[in-house]
Image: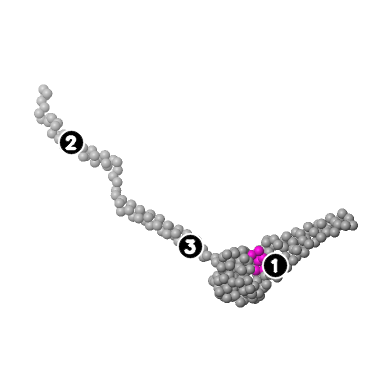
Amino acid sequence: MNTQKYISLLAQPQQISKEDLSNLGSIITKYPFFQSARALQLKGLKNENSFLYNEALKKTAAYTTDRDVLFDYITSDVFLQNEISEQILQNSEAIKRMEVISENISEKISAEIDQQLKAEIKKAEAILHPKLFERKEEKKEAENTLNVNEPLSFHKNETHSFSEWLKLTKATPIDRSEDENTFASENANQDVARKFELIERFIQEKKRPVASLEDSKKDSQEKNINLADPYTKPSESFMTETL
């Protein structure tokens, strides 16, 4: 892509073709901070109704230092980036060329002029400061339902900040953690109940009467009776008075 073609696209971004998008992608890869090239690519993607537009919008807004200009650019058919930048530079140069005449004036007037000069210099620095163009965040919820993989549509009366753009392009995942935890808890309770039921059934089936300690001793004594004891005792019929 030559310089003449690039300037033509800046003047008429609605004429960007698919081939121009490919060339702009190569330029951005080589020069990632080339803001006007990113803006042209963004406009071309929107013209093509590409699903890559939303992602490119976030990247372009992240790389640009003037998001107000970017917003105007994506909501207009023709936008000349050079007019804004030249106006800022002219204001800065005019302030730098200011001269303070100190002849035949009092110290008080000189001090006032010096203060005014410093104030003008601060204004000039603020104009060129990147943070100047960061719009304040306004907590507003998106009223329109967004379609997946379709470019976001903006209008002139909408002043979304960059953070709101990011929120609009994010898809909220469905939180299923609570349902999964509830399901797991129910399964755990069922397992515990089933185990207690098996233990109770085992105890009932294996239950047997237990003999008392006295019965055990009695049985032991009966088992220990000497069967030869009657035959070992001397008979009274064999005993005499002498004996």
Q: For the N terminus, which image quadrant?
A: bottom right
Q: CA distance from mark 3 to mark 2?
A: 76 Å
Colouring used for the render? one colour
- Regarding mark 3 in the picture, which secondary structure is present there? helix
Name the residue type under label 1.
Ser
In x, y percent, where is residue 203?
33, 52
Nearest the camera: 3 or 137?
Answer: 3
Mark 2 or 1, which is nearer the eye?
Answer: 1
Name the residue type under label 3.
Asp
Residue 230 inside the magenta-drawn segment: no
Q: Residue furthest right?
A: 104
Q: Which residue is mark 1?
A: 85
Nearest the camera: 119 or 181?
Answer: 119
Q: Which residue is mark 3?
A: 179
The correct choice, above or below, for 6 with respect to 223 in the image is: below
Q: Which residue is mark 2?
A: 226
Q: Is residue 200 left or right of residue 180?
A: left
Q: Sequence-wise, which precedes: disc 3 or disc 2?
A: 3
Name the residue: 80% across, 61% down: 98
Q: What residue range appears in magenta?
A: 64-70
In x, y percent, where is residue 216?
27, 41
Q: Is residue 78 left or right of residue 26?
A: right
Name the residue: 80% across, 59% down: 117
Q: Kindly tell me whether residue 214 is visible in this rendering.
A: yes
